Amino acid sequence: MNEKNDKFSEENKSYALFNKRKSTPEEAAEKKKYINELNSYHRERTTIRKFEKKDSKSLVNLVLLTNAIAENSTLFPYGKNVEEIVSIMKSLDVDENFYCAVNRNDQFQGFCGIDFELNSLYAKLYGPYIERSIQNKERGSELLKKIKEECKIKGIKEIQTAIDSKNKIAEKFLLKHGFAKDHNTILFQSFRASRHKIYRNSKDKVFILEPGDSVNEITKFCCENEKNCQKDENYFKNKLENFNIKYFASQRDLELNGLLELDMTFPKEPVINYINIHSEHGDEDLFRLLLVSAAQIAFRKIETISLKLMINEEKRELFTEVDKLGFRITDKYQWMNYKI
């Protein structure tokens, strides 16, 4: 063992950091110097590299350690256990689009990733998540820098992410690195005991889209009824081919007037990520019809405990209807974006 490694051995570290007796001014100065050298040593020996398959278990452990599978996590907002986290990892191209920080022994200490699923112009940020021992040592900044470089190479114009509205530390970090606040999203939750009745007198017909269905009309509908629409035909084509995603469309007089996306990735707590209604002849009845249709499909699965619903905070006119259907507010997210 060389002199430097010996200096930072467990025995010396224990003595320097955890000596219980009161220190003299000289000893206190020596301890402070030691801690600074130790931090510098770890900074020098921590490297950033591409995520590898062998890191999968470490990623899950880090997420568990940092409580990142809680309801307010940005990476696994609806995950409850390791199996569900692994299922998300399989759906993401982690090998290609994730970076991790490792120490001198190639041990996993943090990660940050990007998902290009929206289309060629927009991407979703995951992380960065950093082990406590190297927090506040610029590791998160370095990981985020790598992600920005990757996005620039791929021609991405905007990076998006969502954080819990109470997480001011994450907000401060993202603002420091050029992100700007966008909109807030309210998370509602409805439990199995809630009653969801279909409204038989509705003028609209609801059906589930299937893989292979034409996406031209859907794309046109979204672009006409959504501000800053980020969805193209490839987006909907990929979504329809994902067996965990179901799209409910509504028609009135053979014209598309409503669309809802139900994500069944987590059978215990499926989530409605997206709902859009025609700006002119859409109404509360149509909103209820789409929502109830999705709820009935979701609660057919025996393991389903609750259904979650994300709504833009600006659409407060829908909150009353959501409340009538048994949904209750559980969380609030702040969406942030970085323009490249």
Image: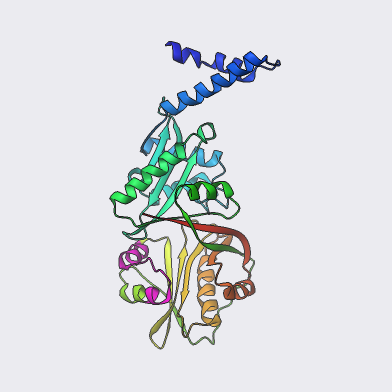
Where is residue 17? Give x, y as percent.
Answer: 61, 20
Where is residue 129? Give x, y as percent.
Answer: 49, 42
Q: Is residue 44 visible?
A: yes
Looking at the image, residue 37 lies above or below residue 319 = above
Q: Horizontal placement of 255 versus 69: left or right?
A: left
Instruction: Specify whether residue 237 is painted magenta.
Output: yes
Specify the quadrant that holds the C terminus.
bottom left
Which of 113/21 is in front?
A: 21
Looking at the image, residue 161 lies above or below residue 31 = below
Where is residue 133? Give x, y as percent.
Answer: 53, 31
Q: Horizontal placement of 112 versus 171: left or right?
A: left
Q: Residue at x 50, y 70 (%)?
A: 294
Magenta stretch, overall SS: helix
Q: Residue at x 45, y 80 (%)?
A: 278
Q: Residue at x 50, y 26 (%)?
A: 39
Q: Residue at x 38, y 65 (%)?
A: 230
Which of 24/74 is in front?
A: 24
Q: Residue 307 appears in which quarter of the rendering?
A: bottom right
Q: How is the image coloured?
A: rainbow
Specify the quadrant that holds the N terminus.
top left
Bounds of the magenta segment: 221-241
